[in-house]
Image: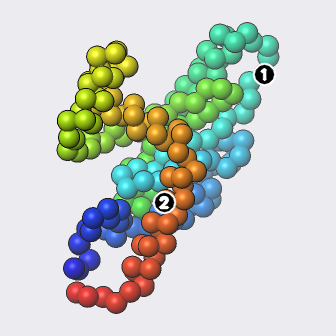
Amino acid sequence: MGRGWRGRGGWQQADLPSADDAAAWFAGRLPDGWFTGAAEVIVDREEITVVGTLAPLEGEFDDASRSAAESGRISRWREETRDERIEIARQAEHRYGRKVAWGASLGSTRELFTHLAVPVMTRLRQPERQVLDTLVAAGVARSRADALAWAVRLVGEHADTWLGELRDAMSKVDDLRSQGPDLA
């Protein structure tokens, strides 16, 4: 059971550089004035997503035009910062061994761009497949893959606290495991 072993339920990132300091690194690296506060930095095994809040719009808008104006401002920010974001992402990818995705929010509009869609393989027994097939037949999803993504999003929306506690516990297990004896 050397370093490369992945036990049942093992969510290990031993082969990746730690990204524990990613939020702090981006806070120090991002240009002043891009966002109204600290950027939200979300890290997983494949990707780091950086989302910041843009300065509020000035002027009066009805709901439909406000949404369009927010989307337009985000689009403008995306174009104006493209070259610098690419350079920052290159540095972060070298440091953390993960791709970097970007996004911005303004008012009630939140847009992500350049983010990954990572394929995930799984084996499902008939009862689980029937759930996915029901979602497809009902028009909730176009395919089993879309149905599975929909289900995962739904669980994520309703289990944030529990998932956060689970991630904290896994992190503690990883820390303890790294402090243990080297069996190699």
Residue 17 placement (x, y as % from top left): 39, 67
Identify residue for label 2. 167
Q: Residues within 10 Å of mark 1 (few under 14, many from 20)?
A: few
**Left-right relation of 1 to 45:** left
The image's mark for residue 127 is: none
How many callouts does the rendering have?
2
Q: Nearer the viewer, residue 143 or 32?
A: 143
On-image quarter of the N terminus: bottom left
Toward the front, the furthest residue is: 127
Picture residue at 57% right of the left edge, 57% below the top: 23
Q: CA distance from mark 1 to mark 2?
A: 40 Å
Amino acid carrying label 1: it is Glu
Residue 167 placement (x, y as % from top left): 48, 60
Amino acid carrying label 2: it is Arg
Q: Residues within 10 Å of mark 2 (few under 14, many from 20)?
A: few
Residue 50 placement (x, y as % from top left): 53, 46
Residue 52 placement (x, y as % from top left): 61, 41
User: Mark 1 or mark 2, which is nearer to you?
Assistant: 2
Picture residue at 60% right of the left edge, 47% below the top: 40
Picture residue at 46% right of the left edge, 50% below the top: 48
Identify residue for label 1. 58
